[in-house]
């Protein structure tokens, strides 16, 4: 084994950089039919962040734990939180729409999650009625039910209420 001197340690510590680790937990809905489409698009966003140099490591976890992945951001905790809160493109619709999630701390164990999903006006009635991640399309209640599931999973993972 290589011997590491105190001088080497001081030199390496001076060169270290702060990273932020984000643990992604599998919510109860993670294994439900249709979730694979959402997970796929989430992965696309993660790899886009990686290609942009913001997300250094994207690591899926495939074991029996509730951990779904690990992300290591080349950013401070505040910057990583801002990136995770940022507007993302939702490609689960026939034409891209935007989803903005905003997390507001209301207390030591209380967070408000606000969702704004916009860009629906560019979809035709036929596209809105077509099956999506849920049967019946957006006009058949998939929008309302889908977000209720997603936010319910978020609440379950964090131990909160939906």
Image (spheres, rainbow, N blue to C red):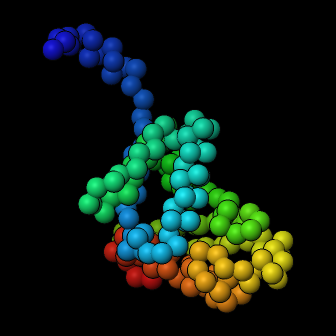
Residue 8: percent from left, percent from top:
27, 12
Q: Is residue 126 above or below residue 78?
A: below
* Residue at 51% across, 48% down: 80
Asked whether residue 110 appears in the rendered view, the answer is no
Residue 160: percent from left, percent from top:
38, 77
* Residue at 45% across, 39% down: 57
Q: How many marks?
A: 0
Left or right: residue 103 compared with residue 140: left
Q: Quadrant of residue 42?
A: bottom right
Asked whether residue 14 appears in the rendered view, the answer is yes
Residue closest to the eye, 108 or 89:
89
* Residue at 84% across, 77% down: 124
Q: Quadrant of the N terminus?
A: top left
Q: Quadrant of residue 141?
A: bottom right
Residue 56: percent from left, percent from top:
48, 37
Q: Is residue 64 above or below residue 159?
A: above
Residue closest to the eye, 1 or 6:
1
Left or right: residue 130 compared with residue 72: right
Residue closest to the eye, 132 or 54:
132
Left or right: residue 95 compared with residue 51: right
* Residue at 61% across, 83% down: 135
Left or right: residue 7 compared with residue 28: left
Residue 126: percent from left, percent from top:
81, 81
Q: Is residue 14 above or below residue 82?
A: above
Q: Quadrant of the C terminus?
A: bottom left
């Amino acid at each position: 084994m290589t011997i590491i001197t105190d001088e080497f340690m001081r030199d390496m510590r001076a060169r270290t950089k702060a990273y932020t680790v984000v643990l992604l937990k599998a919510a109860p809905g993670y294994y439900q039919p249709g979730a694979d489409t959402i997970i796929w698009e989430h992965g696309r966003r993660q790899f886009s962040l990686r290609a942009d140099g913001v997300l250094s490591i994207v690591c899926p976890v495939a074991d029996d734990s509730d951990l779904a992945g690990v992300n290591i951001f080349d950013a401070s905790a505040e910057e990583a939180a801002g990136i995770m809160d940022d507007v993302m493109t939702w490609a689960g619709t026939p034409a891209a729409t935007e989803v903005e999630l905003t997390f507001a701390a209301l207390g030591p164990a209380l967070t408000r999650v606000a969702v704004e999903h916009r860009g629906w006006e560019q979809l035709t009635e036929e596209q809105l009625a077509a099956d999506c991640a849920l049967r019946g399309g957006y006009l058949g209640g998939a929008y309302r039910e889908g977000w209720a599931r997603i936010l319910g999973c978020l609440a379950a993972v964090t131990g909160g209420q939906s």
